[in-house]
Image (tube, rainbow, N blue to C red):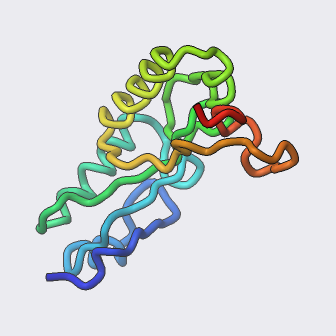
Amino acid sequence: MSTDRHLMLSFDGTSLPAWLEESIAASPPAGVTLFRELNMESPHQLAGLVEKLQGLNRNEPPLLIAVDQEGGQLQGLIGSTPFAGNMALGASGDPNLTARVTAAMGAEMRAVGVNLNYAPVADVATRPGNPSLGVRSFGEDPT
């Protein structure tokens, strides 16, 4: 059993570097974080990259393949639909719309093999001057 299953690795490039292939084959990490700017050329290329990553992992469970696909200003998945961001969804006051949008984002991630999204889930904008959260939250009201 690996002792590294708590690590999330990343790399620069659209193909797997030798060190990562060797690492996954020898002692798989928990997973790999992929970045649109560093690792993605097209949905087809991304799906092939993820398939190769999972193929190197000879242990269970599958590797976590993570992106930061928030919608709005942060589109971490190449070729994805440019959905409205969290603040716009929260302002709509329609939880069913939010559920449909997030389900569609999940389907797009699943289609290329991504199984972990770092997107905010319950961030609340309680401090208007917080520049790191801003429109990335669903609003100021936790309900």
Residue 118 x/y as whole percent: 49, 50
The N terminus - image quarter: bottom left
Residue 44, above or below 39: above
Looking at the image, how many numbered discs can be counted on the residues?
A: 0
Residue 54 x/y as whole percent: 22, 56
For the residue pair 102 and 95, the one nearer the viewer reads as: 95
Residue 95, above or below 143: above
For the residue pair 46 and 60, the one nearer the viewer reads as: 60
Left or right, 22 with respect to 142, comes to left
Q: Residue at x 44, y 59 (%)?
A: 33
Left or right, 135 with respect to 1, comes to right
Q: Residue at x 31, y 36 (%)?
A: 110
Residue 12 x/y as whole percent: 52, 64
Residue 30, above or below 140: below
For the residue pair 136 and 69, the one nearer the viewer reads as: 136
The C terminus - image quarter: top right
